[in-house]
Amino acid sequence: MNARLLTAFATVLALLALPGRAADNVTVRLKWFNQAQFAGFYVAKEKGFYQAKGLDVAVQPGGPDFPAVQMVTGGNEQFGVTGADQILVARSKGVPVVAIAVLYRKNPFVLFSMKQAGLDKPEKFREKKIGVKLGGNEELIYRAVLGKAGLSAKDVNEVPVKFDMTPFLAGQIDVWPGYAINEVITAREKGFDVNIIWPSDYGINLYADTLFTTEKMLAEKPDVVQRFVAATLQGWAYAADHPEEAAKITVKHGTKLTYAHELAMMNESIPLLRPDKQPIGSMQPAAWAALQEFLLKGGFMKEAIALDKAYTSKYVGQ
């Protein structure tokens, strides 16, 4: 090795040895258990996108025992993922959360039934047993679809359900409320062919998974927010462009996750992440206004709130 190369090598070693700026430690609490629905976060971490932005990010699963809004507003976590409707509902109750990017701009919630039942439109739900997930945006969307079909709860046989699909698979429920990126895939994996009713086909399309933080975080650490959003959206863009790799990364985050299921979930997610030509993360004022009106009419909010305080597009380059 000649002198010039030795000198260059020594310079690189010296630079690497310099004490760098300590990474900012942050936590993001997911909406649900680990799965490809959140692949962009795993990808951003594994591919070094967070590290490149000077961040050390802990990605934590959510679920019934770890609701993202409560976990983040508790003060020990900085970012979370929840339904866009939950942002508005929380703010209507005085909770200082702010949406900073919408991930699933087309909602994955659907109503589906066994193919042989022929229930390919909600007008055919009359007198059928309909599974209903009470108390959340699933119920809100379901009732809106029912209304679009000219039906009410009195016209169908509603059955409260949770997450176990056994009653549906056993034929005890005619129509099941679930996600096109999860339960529909599970039914197909078990050999069932299904009819899917998309609420968006009836003019009902509420923002779904939304990245949020707190007013305090925005006021005190806007630079951290900027870097986190940039790296996260980079991770999501990469995941959408490389679904096979994203699925392989995802399965590392759960012992019960399978590559085939997570790949199917990733592929089903792409058109929901990119329903139009806008980049992932984009938000539109009209969509937030429509969501608030929906929540008010559905009785989930008592009065309107200032939407310009509920979300900001500052960090998604709009």
Image (cartoon, rainbow, N blue to C red):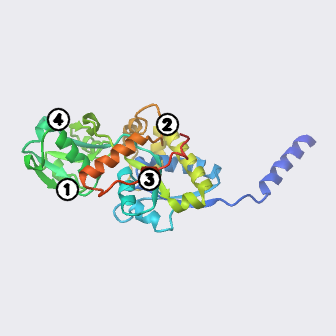
Of labels 1 and 4, the one closer to you: 4
Amino acid type shown at disc 4? Lys
Which one is in front in this view, the residue at disc 2 or the one at disc 1? 2
SS label for mark 3: helix
Q: CA distance from mark 3 to mark 4?
A: 35 Å
Q: CA distance from mark 1 to mark 4?
A: 21 Å
* Amino acid type of the residue that numbered disc 1 sits on in the rendered structure: Val
Q: Which residue type does callout 2 highlight?
A: Pro
* Left-right relation of 293 to 233: left
How far from the left and from the top, in percent, is residue 152? Answer: 12, 46
Q: Callout 3: few (<14), some (14-19), or many (20+) C-alpha neighbours within 10 Å?
A: many
Question: Where does the image place residue 208, in percent across and percent down from the top left?
Answer: 37, 47
Q: Amino acid at mark 3?
A: Ala
| Residue holding disc 2 | 279
* Rendered view: 94 above or below 200: below
Residue located 39% across and 45% down the image: 288
Return the residue at label 4.
121
**Relative to 156, 184 lies left or right:** right
Q: Which residue lies under the disc numbered 1?
A: 161
Give the labeled residue for mark 3: 310
Q: Give the total of numbered labels.
A: 4
* Mark positioned earlier in the residue sequence (4 or 2): 4
